[in-house]
Image (cartoon, rainbow, N blue to C red):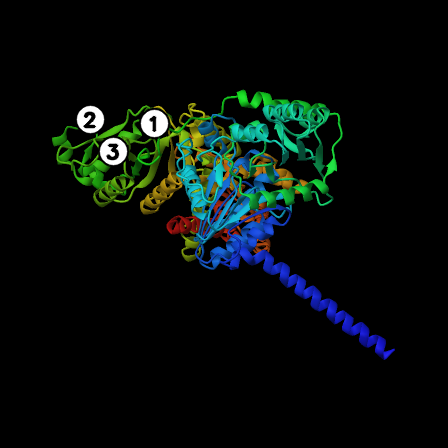
Amino acid sequence: MKWSLRVLFFSLVLILQSSWALAQSRCSEIFKDATNSTGVVNEVIFGQGLNERVFAIIRTATKTLDIETASIPGERFYTEVLARANSGVKVRLLLDGRHYLKDIANKALFDNGIGHLVHPNIEIRLSNPQELSMARSYRESVLHRKIAIVDGRIAYMGSSNLTSNDNFEVGLISRDQVNELQKIFDHDFSQVTDRWQDIKNTIPLEPVKQIEYVGPGTSHPEFKPVSLELIRNAQQTLWLSALDISQNDVVQALIQRHKSNPDLDIRVVITHVPMKYPFAGKYRDRNMNASSANALINAGIPVRWYEVPSKAIIHGRTVITDTSVMGSSADLTERAFSGNIDLGFITQDASIRNQLKTGFLELWETSTPAQIEKESLESFFATRFENWIVPRLKPKGLRSETSIKGQITYGYEVEFVPDINSQIFNFYRLPKFTEDTWLQLTPQQRITEFQTFLADYPKLLRTVLTSLGRLNVVKLQNAPEYLPEKLLIESHGTVEAVGEVFTDSKQMADKIHLLVKILGKGYWQSHVVFPKEYSSYLSGFIAFSTDHAYLSSLTKSYEKFKRDPESIPGVILTHYALGHLSQKGFQEVIENNERSLLGKNVGKGGTQRLINGPALRDDAYPKGLVGMELRQFSVRHEEMLSEVDFVTNLLIKNQMFLFNAFKEIKLLDFKVYEQLTPDRAERWKPFFRRMDRYFKGTSASSVVGGASYEERLLTPLRDWKNHPVVQHTGLSASEIAQAQMRIEDATNVFKAEVDQIIAENRSEKESAIALRISVSKWASATGLESLFSNFRARIENQEKSSP
């Protein structure tokens, strides 16, 4: 018995040692190209496990890491990349933006990935499908290349998007192709910033060891003629694999080649799963290969479906003949041929050809022989729409012909309060006075005359005359030349300077500093104006900035109130022209952003433009231009100038997409009362409606911009727990939970305080003060403003750290 146990024990030890040795051998095999400079120079992998191989290489980065990919940056991807960035590696990421065209779930996953990847050592650029479509003259084009370059010493290109899916992929891992792939990456990285202005220019590549590249910008810019040539020149072997083979010329070429040479060994492996496709306003299941597979099978060509229990798909695109091979990211479809930016390699190198043949034979053996099958009606129409209609549709948008650099212009608006800025009347007079008469008045008399002048006009009439620019003060002859010729008188009693245009933000900053020096502090707004074709993703930025500005104002005013109880917080809640966005207003922002991209007029935006945040408009600028009026800074002109530079950098680098998650915010509508218990809703609704009427009656203007007073006062009842600043800015699970707990606790306190205000039956004035305090207290307690500030700071640091 003891002897038997000893034998069993030693047998187990031997098995474990063998397993360990095998594991070590496999591990070293995976890492050999990442660590061994004397390893294989060019290796082609065609099979499963490519993602692991590339991630292993990525982990060896010590200096630089460049990645171009077309898929959603999932948790595995951003964890690996963040680890490199945290270790000091400078990372450049180039991603495709088509996921914003998909459903809410895809948008949320993509935005979450972007949120995690905002880092000082990571520069992210996103290809806008609309801009790329205009450049390619093909509707809904996609940046579909997949490249990774580590430390300028080893590179990958192929079909894998580096997701967590273990699909059947094709990839080239190379040491002698690094320079060529670097040129392609650098070209694309630059073109995304320049909105794909010179995509047809050839990238200066040189064939190295008989490897050439296929795809836009290379010496073989179009996949279609290369694919057809490979098919037509095949004499003994013609093996193809792809996710999708639906381009009719390719299908017919295969059929004709089979007819002309029945002995030719043709084999086709394609995916056999329903894929979601947008058609007629809905995402529909489309078996993309049903019709082409049926045609090939009917012609006598062997076709196999790649179907495995793990739901993996055949994602490696290859064409293998007796003399040449091609591996690529491009399917054999019209979209890939005419619209997408794909990349493939083509070579006659025997070693690479043999590696691909070995992978294909494995694929062939693990695939299922295809049978004729009836295509569903939904799939039939979706497929025909994709292949016949889409290529004939014009892309939506405006073509950008030149770089945005040098095309951005700037302007400012500033309001001065005469009672505070009395020195204004040392340089300006009321029109009814001659200059001599005006100069004889004392400073106090000038202010009195101004107030009397205003009192002669009812508030509504002042509002009308202000909108027509009919009320103003005139510049005196002895005033400095750099002062505006006249100041407009606003209906609420301030005087405003508008109309100057600058081609450089520093010029505007210098002018503003002069005005502050001579006229004192004012209430500032600034304009950043640019051609309409460069207005992508503005709505998300506007949503972010508006929420941030409002929460910041409430939070800061409450902190001041805690130090000085005499200063009542939340004045922003009562300002007629600095309200928050309403749901209706934000929908208009989104629609106007889309209209702008199509070259249509946006207009002034009505009262929805009067918000405490950036407002989109084009009424005040020459034709073809659109701009954002930054309205959220009040007397903080230095902060405003900093924001101007921030916006400028985002526009030039084409990085407004970093805020795109905020396009999905849910603002307040009056279903909000349905969140409350029935008895609470019954008490709250008439109370807040009454307070809305009170604020309207005590407003400085008959016009109310943005959200109503009722909506502003109910700000704490928005769904802040699921706001993008909580969910999609790279917070960990524990940080999200903590933020949600703070929000919930603060909101419960707010509800209890409102109940108490109502129960005490205070006067409207007393209730207004109590509500301002309560809403401001809520904003401070949630910590939301810090989440906004931290995310913005991360983007700013990323901007400063970009190469």
User: Which type of secondary structure does the marked residue at label 2 adopt?
Assistant: loop
Q: Is residue 496 left or right of residue 31?
A: left
Residue behind mark 1: 620
Q: Is residue 14 left or right of residue 531?
A: right
Disc with the residue nearer the chain's start (2 vs 3): 2
Q: Position of residue 644 (x, y in %)?
A: 35, 41
Vertical relation: 270 (above or below) 392: below
User: Which type of secondary structure does the marked residue at label 1 adopt?
Assistant: loop
Q: Residue at x 63, y 33 (%)?
A: 236
Looking at the rendered structure, the kind of residue marked 2 is Lys
Looking at the rendered structure, the kind of residue marked 3 is Phe
Vertical relation: 425 (above or below) 174: above
Q: Residues within 10 Å of mark 3 (few under 14, many from 20)?
A: some
Location of residue 646 by image quarter = top left
Residue behind mark 2: 432
Residue behind mark 3: 450
Q: From the viewer's perspective, is the residue at label 1 or at label 2 nearer?
A: 1
Looking at the rendered structure, the kind of residue marked 1 is Ala
Disc with the residue nearer the chain's start (3 vs 1): 3
User: Which type of secondary structure does the marked residue at label 3 adopt?
Assistant: helix
Q: Is residue 220 left or right of residue 50?
A: left
Location of residue 654 by image quarter = top left
Seen as rendered, the residue at the extreme right is 1
Q: Residue at x 40, y 55 (%)?
A: 564
